[in-house]
Each structure stands twice: as C-alpha cells, then as structure tokens.
Amino acid sequence: VPYYRYFVFNLTDPNSPLKSVESRQAPAYGVDWNSLVTAIYPKLGKVINSGVTSGMPFKDPSLPYYKYDPAKAKALLAAGKFDFSKTVRLRYYYGDQSAITLMTAVAKQLQALGMKVEVLKFQGDATTELYTTRQYDAALKGLSAFNVSEWYSEYSNTATFEKIIGPQPKFAQLNSDLSQAGSRRATSDA
C-alpha cells in the first residue's frame, strides 16, 4: 500500500504569492526532492511524479520528472511574476520529526530562491485547516491508497479538494469512469 506525502496548493486565495502556475512549478525544480527524500526517509521514500508509482499498471511514462534546477525555478518565478515581498505560508499537520525536518529543509531551499517562507504546523483539525480555514499557500498532505482509483478520487471530492482547487468537472468525470471501470483496459483508458 503506497503512502503518499505531497503538497497541495490553495488556489482559492487570489492574494497568494503562488497564484500563478509558474510559481507553483518553481518548487518542483527549486527543491532537491531526491536528496531530501533519500536523507529524511532512507529506504522508505521515493520521489514520484503522479499517484501511480513506478511498476504499477497504468503508469504514464510521458509524465515529466522534475530535475533539481534552481536556475529554472528562478526563471519560472520571474515568468509567473512572483511577488518576492509576500511570504509563502507552508503548513503541515504531521507531528513526527521527519515531517518537521522536511518542511524546514523545503523552506530553506525556497529561501535560497529568494522567497520569504513561513513554516507552521496547523493548530486545529487538519481537515478543517486544509479545506475550510485555508490559511496557507502550500500544505504537506498525506494519503494511503490501495489502488489508483482511490488516489485520484480524492481530487474530485466536493467536500475536500474542490474547496481548494475549485470544481474540476472533466477530472470528476474521469474519476467516475475510473471507479466504474470493469476491465484493465477501461481502467487504463480512464
């Protein structure tokens, strides 16, 4: 059973410094994810580029992997007109030392790109903080998923992710197709 830790962005805040697509892509290049994951989660963690891990059926080999490239990250921030006067609010709800270490390291690498960063643990219930309060720009989230359908269904859930990314009707339809797929081919198509 894969256990995913990943960042979600609050797309509902029009004042977020991460409102542009380019500014949200910048951390993919500006943080050395492979080094961090290897150091913090030795023999357990692996950087992946989607909810479908390597070796699983339906892995899409055309999806890009993001290689550590601070120059590209800085170029993306410039292209996205990132406002360096604003502070990026990173949040997490895990209390374990590995999450704290990860968030501290991510903040340092984003600061090396010139970003102001604030890292705080959510003070209340994680579900409320993520989907109702939404006082963050990016938050570390986790999910244990038994299959591909379970992983992707979270993103079209109107009670959760729709509140931070907005309605995604096309994606919701694909999730519905995926959950109703009766064959490997139908699952692969979805």
Image (cartoon, rainbow, N blue to C red):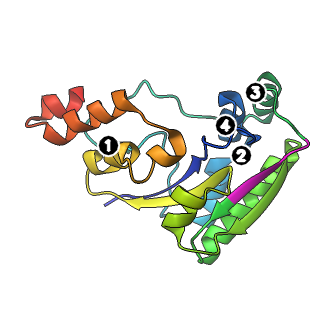
Mark 3 packing: few (<14 Cα in 10 Å), some, or many (20+)? many
CA distance separating discs 4 and 2: 12 Å
Q: Is residue 158 left or right of residue 82?
A: left
Precedes in sequence: disc 4 or disc 2: 4
Q: Amino acid at mark 2?
A: Val
Residue range of the region highlighted in magenta in the rendering? 85-90
Mark 1 packing: few (<14 Cα in 10 Å), some, or many (20+)? few
Q: Secondary structure at mark 1?
A: loop
Precedes in sequence: disc 1 or disc 2: 2
Residue 79 — which label?
none
Q: Is residue 58 visible?
A: yes
- Which of 55/99 is in front? 99
CA distance separating discs 4 and 3: 9 Å
Q: Quadrant of residue 103?
A: bottom right
Tell me, yes or no, whether the highlighted magenta stretch contains residue 107.
no
CA distance separating discs 1 and 2: 25 Å
The residue labelled by disc 3 is: 76
The residue labelled by disc 1 is: 55
- Which of 142/57 is in front? 142
Q: Quadrant of residue 105?
A: bottom right
The residue labelled by disc 4 is: 24
The residue labelled by disc 2 is: 31
Precedes in sequence: disc 2 or disc 3: 2
CA distance separating discs 3 and 1: 31 Å
